Every structure is written in C-alpha cells, then in structure tokens.
Image (cartoon, rainbow, N blue to C red):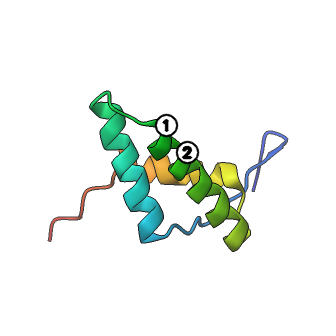
Amino acid sequence: MAVAGRTIRLVAIELSDDLIQLETKAWEEIQAGALTVDTAAAVQAAITAHAEATGQLRYDVEMELKKRDRNPVPPLAG
C-alpha cells in the first residue's frame, strides 16, 4: 500500500503464548516499579529468538507484542 510516496507494509505478526506471557510479566513489573534486569533481558532475548525463528522483523515483533499486551482489545459483547 502506498500513501503519499511512502510504502506501508501490512503484515500479520505471529506471537507465541509464551512470548505474550513473558511480556505481561515484564509489563506488570514495570507498572509496580519493580522491573528486573533479568526480566527485561529475558523479554528482549525471547523477542529476538522469536523474530529469527519466524522470519519476522524484530522491531515488528516487539511493537506488536507491546501493543497487544498494553492495549488489549476487549472481547465483543454478544
């Protein structure tokens, strides 16, 4: 898709449950003011490994992970 001379990539980012759980733990620690170096390093290592294993860009994986964890979409009422 091109917008005003720019190309926008529309890519579905795949995330594993383990990766989401690790980011959730880190986000909870951040909110409590208790993020540890070990947790932060584990999240970064897991993001990098996941990106390499799935052929996705590391940046895209990290941004999608943070978006899903920090701004979850509520379930539809029905």
Residue 15 position in % (x across, y down): 51, 67
Picture quarter with the C terminus = bottom left
Q: Is residue 11 visible?
A: no
Image height of 39 relative to 73, above or below: above
Q: Residues within 10 Å of mark 1 (few under 14, many from 20)?
A: few
Q: Looking at this view, is 5 or 29 the one in front? A: 29
Give, as a three-letter code, the residue at label 2. Answer: Ala
Quarter of the image for residue 46 reads bottom right
For the residues bearing labels 1 and 2, Cβ distance under 8 angstroms: yes
Give the residue pinned by disc 1: 37
Q: Looking at this view, is 16 or 64 the one in front? A: 16
Residue 45 position in % (x across, y down): 61, 54
Please give left or right for residue 27 compared with residue 6 in the image: left
Task: Name the residue located 27 percent from the left edge and 31 percent from the top edge.
Answer: 32
Element under label 1?
helix
Give the residue pinned by disc 2: 41
Task: Name the residue located 52 percent from the left edge and 51 percent from the top edge.
Answer: 42
